[in-house]
Amino acid sequence: MVTGASSGIGAAAARLFAAEGAAVVLVARREDRLRALEKEIAGSGGRAVAAPADVTRTDEVAAAVAVAVDTYGGLHGAFNNAGWATVGTDLHETDDAVFQQIMDVNVRGVWNCMRHQIPVMLRSGSGAIVNTSSVAGVLATGAVSPYVAAKHAVIGLTRAAAAEYGQRGLRVNALVVGNTRTELMDQVLEETPGLEERFLARPIQKRMAAPSEVAEAAVWLCSDRSSFVTGAAVPVDGGWTAA
């Protein structure tokens, strides 16, 4: 199950999961894009099913998990990647609505997903969950303050879940993602002149990630190749947090 699968990192991950032999449940709000990706993956010989859902709505997440069970007989891996950010202002000038939307998508979305994914995984005795955090989850990066808080919360939820379910066959990890060249990032850069130069100055590699580079880490963490990794916040940031 991949959330935020309609574009960017989520779409790249869905393609890679399918190429590695996984049956993929595509979750996002934009049904037209999910259907197009479903068709693309099938055309490449993979298996995918679209399950349109808004991760902030627990009933819709439950329905998406039910699609996985009904279509494939279970759920063994999840990449909870859906997120939202905006170019913000100082904390005291940030609107309540902005705070709420950031928290709803980035924190409640992960919470909703894990609440419905974990019971299904427990029934089979194994499973791997990867949640998308950010360099803003470990540092005050200059991003709008609610986003920094939300991505810190994702790491907290990840570690708590890893500890709670580690002896019941589940692994839960987070990705500490650096700046990635997605549609949302392009929009943010267009709205804020000079921001790209500041972003490129921070990581050791002096560049942004391609969505496929982040997807590789997610697929690895969901696979048996990472069987002794849990409760981790894994940097995929070009060295941002090391500098």
Image (cartoon, rainbow, N blue to C red):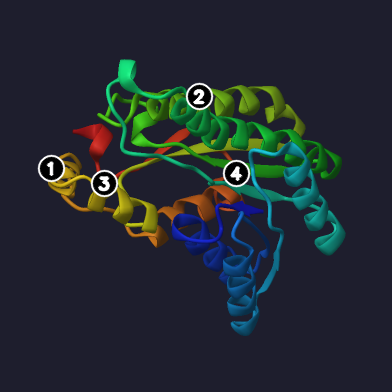
Which disc is residue 110 wearing? Answer: none
In front of the other: 232 or 197: 197
For marks 1 and 2, give the CA distance: 26 Å
Mark 2 residue crowding within 10 angstroms, few (<14) / some (14–19) / many (20+): many
Name the residue: 77% across, 49% down: 65
- Name the residue type under label 3: Gly
Which disc is residue 227 wearing? Answer: 4
Discs 4/1, front:
1
For marks 3 and 1, give the CA distance: 11 Å
- Name the residue type under label 4: Ser
Q: Secondary structure at mark 1?
A: helix
Mark 3 lies on residue: 238
Rendered-image quadrant of the C terminus: top left
* Residue 101 in the image: above or below residue 212: above
Point out the tag, 4 or 1, that comes first from the N-terminus: 1
Point out the tag, 2 or 3, that comes first from the N-terminus: 2
Q: Position of residue 206 (x, y in %)?
A: 16, 49
Discs 4/2, front:
2
Which disc is residue 201 wearing? Answer: 1
The answer to the question of whether label 2 and label 3 lie on touching residues, with beta carbons closer than 8 A, is no
- Name the residue type under label 2: Ala
Mark 2 lies on residue: 153
Name the residue: 48% across, 33% down: 102
